[in-house]
Image (spheres, rainbow, N blue to C red):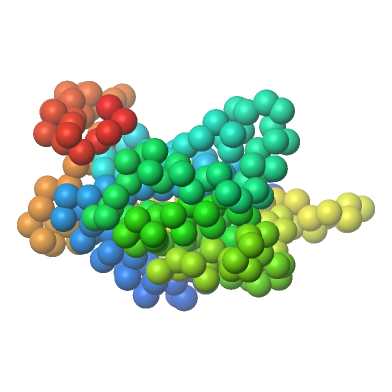
Amino acid sequence: MSAENFLSVLAEKLAAIRSQEGEAIAEAAGMLADTLSGGGLVYVFGCGHSAALSMDLFYRAGGLMLVHPIFDERIVLTHRPVTETTEWEQKEGWAGELVQQAGAQAGDALLVFSTSGRNGAPIDVALSAKAAGLPVIAITSRAYAGSLPSRHSSGKRLHEVADIVVDNHVDPGDAAVSLPGLEQKVGPTSTALSSAVAQALMVEVTARLLERGEDPPIYVSANIPGGMEHNQEVFSRYRDRIRFL
């Protein structure tokens, strides 16, 4: 069954991530734990479907509260016409200012999602963050990025800008399943794989904070008894650091 083929591809790629990206995930977790221990925030950025990955780490049951998304309506899929989001993602020279507008500063860190790693906006955000003194972690595909030239005037892809790179093992073009009678592949894997990497990273960050004797601020589902009360209590303790409240 074709659905099973897709799930098999995901399972194989997750196994590859587990066996090959552990060192990078551990290094990234150490960096983010240092950031949070030092009073900083973790900023996250992505365009289009990668913006959904920023949402996946934000205001999420079981997730860290001190994760701050950098959103812009031009690159989220509620924008109309939606085709313009692709143009804004590819274009350089405008997105770097989003880092300053979000309030990011030295002592914070940035996590950037871009599977192709070639477009102007995510590269500009990464460069702007580095110029402001933030370390940058990229979740990207080296294979995808290596198959195409950069769209940025620097000639660099995201993995060549970031301080730490975690490879999501996505194939060039993203879609991974061939079907008889159809020229194009189907079944994009980047959302599932990048989300798995990002959530694994946040679990490791939380574990490291606990090892240091800290009390990480974690969201609890508002759908279980006591969840809303827990969240409100933690909000009150961290309100000065959670700028989106």
Is 49 situated above or below 73?
below
Tell me which corner region of the image, top left, top right, bottom left or bottom right, holds residue 201: bottom left
- Residue 142 horizontal side relative to residue 15, left or right: right
Residue reaching furthest to the right: 181
Front in this rendered view, residue 141 or 135: 135
- Is any atom of residue 4 visible in this view? no
- The residue furthest left is 213
Residue 130 locus on image (x, y percent):
39, 60
Q: Is residue 215 above or below residue 29?
A: above
Name the residue rendered at 39%, 59% in the picture: 131
Give the quarter of the image for residue 236: top left
Image quadrant for the C terminus? top left
Measuring 68% from the left and 43% from the top, which residue is drawn there? 86
Residue 57's x, y, as percent?
A: 39, 43
Q: Residue at x 47, y 75 (%)?
A: 20
Name the one closer to the observer, 91 or 160.
Answer: 91
Q: Residue at x 70, y 51 (%)?
A: 187
183 or 217, nearer to the observer: 217
Q: Quadrant of residue 204?
A: bottom left
The answer to whether residue 87 is seen in the rendering is: yes
Badge count:
0
- Tell which of 159 and 16 is nearer to you: 159
- Left or right of 22, for residue 178: right
Q: Position of residue 139 (x, y in %)?
A: 48, 60
